Image (cartoon, grey):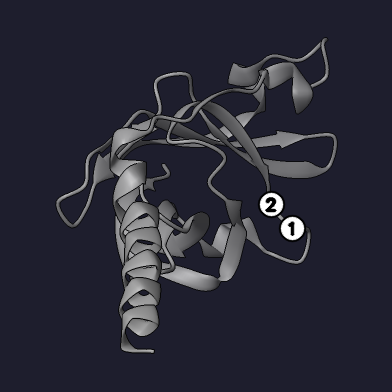
Amino acid sequence: MRKVIIVSALIIGAGVAYWLISPLFITRQVDEDVSDIIAEEADLESATTAQGRFVGLASHSGEGTASLVQSGGTTYIRFGDDFRVTNGPDLFVYLGKDGEYAPEARLGALKGNAGAQNYEVPAELDVNEYNEVWVWCRAFFVPFAKAELR
């Protein structure tokens, strides 16, 4: 019985270790098109109301642009082609304000740690109450990257 417990613990431990460590070696590239959120007759520049550059936080790297885009009555956060962040477990995209992420302003799971991505802002969120975009690890409650929108 003791051997079964030890083997079970080793298998569970290996699974947890893989879940925690493997994202550091895996790059998930995303290439969502801006035409998915903007009508063909409009362009990204005219639809962008604020923009910022990602910086890494808590020993994680982060770079690239984040844009606040208004199109057809809907608001989106767009990560540019140049977006890249350290991969990790349980990463999500949030809005925040003045150096604090807002748990109530979750936009969804991070689609990939590199490349262009679109996130729809829920209609019940007033984007004027936020001035940052965050990549946040829910599993460890730590920030990975942040972009200040101006």
Q: Quadrant of residue 14?
A: bottom left
Residue under numbered circle 1? 122
Furthest-left residue in this view? 59
Contact between labelled residues 2 and 1, with CB atoms less than 8 Å apart = yes
Side of 41 where 63 appears, left or right: left
Q: Residue at x 83, y 19 (%)?
A: 39
Eyeballing the image, is 57 above or below 75? below
Furthest-bottom residue in this view? 1
Q: Residue at x 85, y 34 (%)?
A: 72
| Residue 43 point in image, percent of width and height | 69, 14
| Residue 27 point in image, percent of width and height | 40, 29
| Residue 126 point in image, percent of width and height | 66, 63
Q: Secondary structure at mark 2?
A: loop
Amino acid at pointer 1 = Pro
Eyeballing the image, is 88 above or below 27? below
Label 2 Cα crowd, 10 Å radius (few <14 / some 14-19 / many 20+): many
Q: Residue at x 50, y 36 (%)?
A: 112
Which quadrant would the C terminus be assigned to in this image? top left
Front residue of 106 and 76:
106
Front residue of 112 and 41:
112
| Residue 119 point in image, percent of width and height | 64, 42
Front residue of 62 and 12:
12
Furthest-top residue in this view? 41
Residue under numbered circle 2? 121
Is residue 105 among the parts visible in the rendering?
Answer: yes
Q: Secondary structure at mark 1?
A: loop
Q: Residue at x 64, y 23 (%)?
A: 32
Label 1 Cα crowd, 10 Å radius (few <14 / some 14-19 / many 20+): some
Amino acid at pointer 2 = Val
